[in-house]
Image (tube, coloured by chain):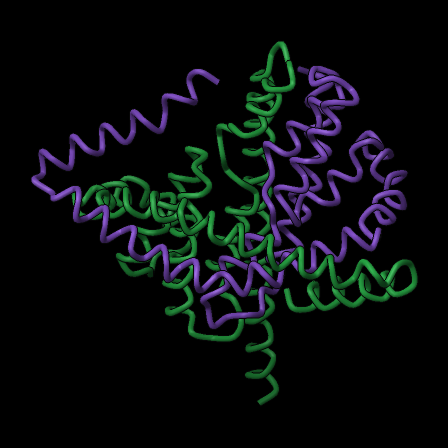
Chain colours: A purple, B green
Amino acid sequence: MTISAFVVPILLITLLIYASIKKVNCYSSFVDGAKSAINLSFDIFPFLVAIFLAVELFRVCGLAEMLAQFLSPVFEFVGIPKELSNLVMIRPFSGSASLAICEEIFETFGPDSYVSRCASVIVGSSETVFYIATIYFSKTKAKKLLYAIPIALLCTIVGAIFSCWICKVI
Amino acid sequence: MRKVWFILICSSLIVLCLKNPEECISAMMRAGQNALQLGLKLCGIYAIWLGFLGIVDKSKLSEKIASLLSPVVDFLFGKNLNQETKKFLAMNLSTNILGIGNASTPLGIKAMQGLDKQNNSEIASTAMIMLLVVSATSLQLLPTTIVGLRASLGSTSSSDIILPSIITTVLTTLLGITLVKVISKLKMQKFSLKKCEKVVKK
């Protein structure tokens, strides 16, 4: 925790010193760079709405939990505790929702229990696949992603299984 | 993506109709508001990172990073890329590794656009798929959010999940890269086989 807190500030200090040695106008380059953020967020907004709508409906209607319950024997078979099946389900869709589930797990089982540690590693080692897929492909002509999403999801599941296993070992 | 979206929305709406149709509209409105909230938040966050990246760019550091990482970029995404795209790819990879996910997203979008321009087709190229898989398997080495959450809930050793997370993330990323490489090779073989067959038939 302490080390990771230093990484970004130190990098930025190095950057600023390097830039001033190179006689770059830091202020105006910063402003120029920041300008493009507005357009970028304008462009990704409709895609955000689309994915949020799908995720929210999927959660509210209870399908997510049903699917998690349905799949929990499968998950348990491959070594993922059944308390975590919900988390594994929601992880590819929404970062904030999976953090909320994580918090719940921490509170019920205590943050240092095996289940909580698994949950942390699962969240820490994976990404919101669907969110990234929509955002990254928001400005492209190519809309057919072929096997990209299946592979990303497969990696997420393998990662989850491996997380639970490595938590047992370490 | 469109298939996934369609199935998700349809099945959820059907289940909602059966269970509690009152929830439907409020859930949709909530989704829209949440999306706007996140969008605004992201706009602010992106502005900060893109600002610093502007300095990186002007001071020609990005070219340095690109040439430093160029063997990696060449291996993952192929050799015939233009300088601009290569730069974004290298920067995206490095921010990813540092765990500044919010800085790597705008770079990823720009890199993806560059790859898209070269690809110029409805179907994603192997390099584009590779970029998605590498980002989606998250090569981040410092899962700061989750460590913070653990600490705030009274964990005695909040950071002892970092090492297992790193091992897992490296493993899944390697798995993803291998799978993309293997599948694209298989596809190429199939493609050339088909070509051969056509030639033979003629």
The structure residue drawn at horizontal position 27% and vertical position 31%, both measured from the top left corner, is: A12
Q: How many labels does the image show?
A: 0
The structure residue drawn at horizontal position 60% and vertical position 76%, both measured from the top left corner, is: B194
- Left or right: A147 in relation to B110: right
Give the position of the N terminus of chain B as an image quadrant. bottom right
Which residue is at the front of the view, B144 or A157? B144
Give the position of the C terminus of chain B as an image quadrant. bottom right
- Single out the residue that lies furthest toward the right: B18
Residue B111, by quadrant, is bottom left
- Left or right: B92 in relation to B22: left
Which residue is at the front of the view, B153 or B22? B22
- Single out the residue that lies furthest toward the bottom: B202
Q: Where is residue B32 in the image (x, y as percent from the top left)?
A: 61, 59
Q: Where is residue B29 in the image (x, y as percent from the top left)?
A: 67, 60
B29 relative to A82, above or below: below
Q: Where is residue B112 in the image (x, y as percent from the top left)?
A: 42, 59
Q: Where is residue A25 in the image (x, y as percent from the top left)?
A: 12, 44
Residue B82, by quadrant, is bottom left
Which residue is at the front of the view, B81 or B110? B110
Residue B16, by quadrant, is bottom right
The structure residue drawn at horizontal position 90% and vertical position 38%, both measured from the top left corner, is: A73
B84 relative to A67, above or below: below
- Left or right: B174 in relation to B12: left
